[in-house]
Amino acid sequence: MSTTNNRQNAHASGKLYQFKLVLLGESAVGKSSLVLRFVKDQFDDYRESTIGAAFLTQTISLDDNTTVKFEIWDTAGQERYKSLAPMYYRNANCAVVVYDITQASSLDKAKSWVKELQRQADPNIVIALAGNKSDLSARRAIDSEEAQAYATDTGLLFFETSAKTAVNVNELFTSIAKKMPLEQLAANSRGRGSSSKQRGVDLTSPTSSNNCSC
Amino acid sequence: MATFATDKEINASFQQDVHLGVNSFSAVAGIEDRDVVPATATTEIFGRFQALKTLLHPNLCEYVEIVKGKHDRLFVVFEYHMNHLGELYQSSGQVSKLGISMLREWAFQILKALAYLNQNGITHHNLAPHNILYDVEGRIKLADYGLFYMTNGGVDVDFPIGYPHYLPPEAIYRQVNKPEATGKVDVWSLGVILAEIFTGSPFWEGNDKDIEKLFSSLWKLQEEEEHNDDIWEKFFIWELGINEAILEFLQGTDDDDIVDFRKFIRACLKVDVSNRCSPEQLLSHPFFSSSYGHGLSNNYKYWWKKPFLQSQQIDFDEESLFEPVDDQPNKDVLHRMPLSQIYYFWKLAGGDVETELAKRGYLLSTPPIERIPRTVKVQDGKEEGTTEDTAFLFSDTIYTLSLKELRQRLEVATGPNREAFEWDTDYFLLIDEDDMNFLVEEMSDNDNSGSGDEVFGKYLFPDPNNHKVTSSSTNGQTTPPTNNVKLPLMNREKDVGYQFQRVALFSELLRQYPASRDEIIHHAKVDIPPFLRGKIWAAILGVKGDYQALYDSFKKETETTTDRQIDVDVPRCHQYNQLLSSPIGHEKLRRLLKCFIAANANNKLVYWQGLDSLCAPFLTLNFNDEALAFSCLHTFIPKFAQDFFLSDNSPVITEYLAVFRHLLSFHDPELSSHLDRIGYHPELYAIRWFLTLFTHVFPLEKTYHLWDKILVGPPSLPLFIGISILRQLREMLIKSEFNDCDTFSESFPDVDIEKCIQSALSMCKVTPPSVIYRVHEPFATPDTLHNGVPDHHIQRWWEQPIPINDKKTELAPRISLKDLVKLKNHVLVIDIRSEQEFSRGHFPLSVNMDPTQLEQFAHALRLENKKYHVVLGKRGDLGPQFAADLVRANFPRVAVLTGGIDVMRVDPEEGVSVCACRNFTSGSKNGTAAYRKCRICF
Ligand SMILES: Nc1nc2c(ncn2[C@@H]2O[C@H](COP(=O)(O)OP(=O)(O)OP(=O)(O)O)[C@@H](O)[C@H]2O)c(=O)[nH]1
Ligand SMILES: [Mg+2]
Ligand SMILES: [Zn+2]
């Protein structure tokens, strides 16, 4: 798989699809690290924690004439920032819910994010579950099988990733791109271009839909 | 109570003829088998070293700084004296003639120092004749006593610590990685050294390099000890390679003169650690008993002054040998100056330890050192022994730094022809003749403001016309004469002459704190000398009283639900910083955060991610004074981040960001409407700006400069800094669509902090306070918005706070009538009511137009060429929407008059009354009468 930032090329060779992707998950599971690996192919032991949210973009080519551009919202993991999350996932097309394979509690947190997305987000949202830090298998606290079973039951894509060694990171994002109903969305995104209101995130009363009970 | 002069600064006056010495070593290479992000050994040493800087004892050389050089080589800078006990060995035989009283004096001072180290949890473990120095007055000064401590008992380095000939058996055969060493190790070393000096012969005979023999002897001592009470009386002792002279002395029979001395040495040389005394205990040994006691500490003065000899261990800086000896030390510019300050200035004058040592060939030489082959380390049943040469890792060669250049520079800086610097107190005051200055206005309004504590509620700025300051506590330390040298901030910080003057000024002021607080603030507005930044900040913040007791009073160890979050954030907080990335730094930051939470439980403040970053500047500036760091944070938050850390902070943050957006419209309507159009709202990028007051955005070095100004500026300054940042990136932003705006998420683009501060201040000056009014502002009173409304007054419609959702959607801010009146000649008031209403009464000189006709009249409005545009309407009309249209049409400084025409009728402001003239002129040439202008002046 190849990644490219070159929009010109992407346009010239075929169709460009744009998706809004949001990352959710407990603090320090490695959301920002995954994004950094995907966007810049770097890893940083001393990455600062995320406050509020961070926005990045990355473009990948699926094949010669299909290019997908992700608008990525990397959110803050601390529970307190939870009320901001709807602002980022409300009109997201896809989501990566991340847990840390060495932290048992982080999978529970991931499950509750999945529930919230299924209840509050766009019904067609494509969700992937990522068990990160697979390089630390010596300290593994969550079985792959268990997580895989949960993902299958819930209809999620599933990968064990490592932002540190880059294992499965591009695979994760590529499978998401492949699972997107491209044609259907293409129609939407053509309409979207003209209306700037549709862009970015939804700032209208971020707390109004925050009535989920999980 | 809280004067911020440390013991060291007071002590400095006693120091004379001190040198700065440097030596260097490397830590062990990375430890691979840790899966947690490893703190490298270098970082660990760096962190542990910091505590050494706080040690203060008359018989210890002060530790000044640790510097990390290329390839992680560490350089330690410390107080150094030219003479040491090792020199006595060259004149052996003579030594016993020194007399017992001399040895008693030395023993006593060394033990004092060792006992002090012990109290501070430090074992020397490295004691040898050549690192027992003495100063010009003959006072003992131990050097190199921190190596064992800072390397975690030697674990962090690949070379052994200690000189085998002076180490006791248990130090050699101690299990590696189990540094259970205590001060008793040093007691043995002291015994050996004193016995050597007394007898004039080395303790161990034979070749220095015959380490094997030495080790087996020590081993034998250790073994035999188990079966023997008093090993020194035994026969086998003669077979261990100990010099006969030493043994004869130890076994000698009573001789009145030295019986106590012998007993003392034998007490030091107890092989069994449990029987050996600690330094503390030995201080009460009969050797020091009162019959000799009265002589201690004085009778040796100047006794040992002699031309020094260049020893093998010391590489003198040739130049420094020929530095003229100053007969009148008071004339020395460096006299009374703390060593850390001397070192700081030395660096400013161009000094750099690494280059300095390289110049003198240090990096080429691999000095021979004695070393213990790192003894058997048993790990998982495997035996590992290191045999390769580790000499290059460590050198106990000491280099002295030449202070000649620094003295010359400072003599110029303090001499009669010194450079005079203009201390640009006008920084905050530069007045554009043609414009407003709300800061100055506010200041004169508050002339009779009360104590300095109010300074944050008001804009207490110095009077532009004279340099008198509010407090008169200093003696002649006011603004110095000026000429026209104006240096940019960054140059001022690197100018040794300038910094010398600044440090002198602030040191004096700090000594007089808290009385001098106003004056400190006054001078801090110019700039803050980095050397004293931590303390100056504390003084500005008004930290007073027993802050240590305050800090100690909070429980910092109790487990809480936020612990996990703190634990994952601390190792991610500014880890490029040497202090914060050290394990000790992590512990300290964690404790500070937990203390803050405990201290604010009643204020309902909680830990939000970001508080760690906010804490970082205070911790790095006061690394050895956690209590002070805490008190700074504790006074800072209510002043600058009031309620940001409430568990439900969203009303506060939402309002803050709404005001930020208004302010952007006010000062850069084009950029504001562009960002608004592409949907790039402050919520998406600016939360971390304000929540952490930019500490999560900039590296610490930039944050310090930003905060230097935030601390002495008006509370709204951070908002303006935010605007300045956007405006520095303007060119890029204005071309961007939403997707291109990912700049802010990444490592921050290059922002020039000095320019940023300057433009923030100049925007701040021309911004009416009501425009940035926040309900959640610290010290907020509705007065800011509705001046002069009596308390008993029934609330008018315009006195209700604007619902937050309206405030959030509106693009332009509101302005109060009071502020509007001050704008006088600079403002165009645009009245959007009907013609009839307008003719019944209006704001003098205002124009009247139909708000839907902006396109048609925009040109006419622009011709008025005013700096401010205020929309006047009535309750519930289109004022805010019309103001937004004006912003989109790129009109500068647009605001809506709070209360519209009603406020003018009900609460008239002095200096303006409703005009009821009918003497309008039409601004429109094409016959429509839709644009009218009042011609009557105020
Ligand atoms: N070993 C290992 N460490 C990782 C991996 N991914 C992230 N980390 C580390 O885990 C820590 C947290 O990573 P972040 O990317 O900051 O986590 P986050 O989910 O963005 O955290 P918040 O911003 O607080 O929500 C960092 O110290 C990373 O270096 C990984 O794949 N393997
Ligand atoms: Mg993150
Ligand atoms: Zn009039």
Image: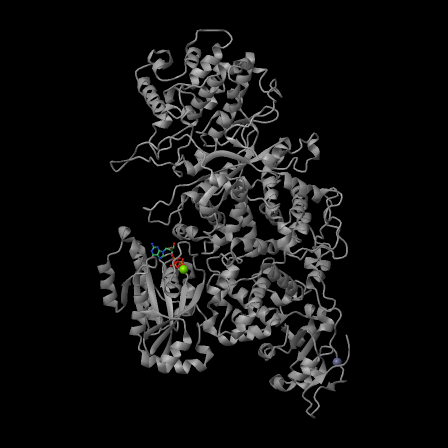
Residue B269: horizontal and vertical position, in percent? Answer: 41, 18
The scheme the figure's colours follow is: one colour
Q: Residue at x 68, y 84 (%)?
A: B860
Query: Seen in the image, is B409 located left or right of residue B553?
Result: right
List x then y, in percent, for residue A78.
40, 58
All told, the count of numbered labels is 0
Judge whether A114 appears above or below B515 on screen: below
The residue positioned 48% from the left and 43% from the top of the image is B554
Figure quadrant, ligand 3: bottom right
Inspect this view and state whether residue A124 appears. Answer: no
- Up/down of B511 relative to B61, above or below: below
Asked if residue B457 shows in the view, the reply is yes
The percent position of residue B857, horizontal first and vertical second, equals 65, 85
* Nearer to me, B877 or B679: B679
Report the front residue among B910 and B505.
B505
Q: Is residue B732 above or below residue B604?
A: below
Q: Examine the image and state in which quarter residue A71 appears.
A: bottom left
Give the position of the N terminus of chain A as an image quadrant. Answer: bottom left
Q: List the single residue furthest toward the bottom.
A: B927
Residue A49, x across and y down, in percent: 43, 57
Image quarter (top left, top right, bottom left or bottom right) of the C terminus of chain A: bottom left
Name the foreground residue: B895 vs A15. A15
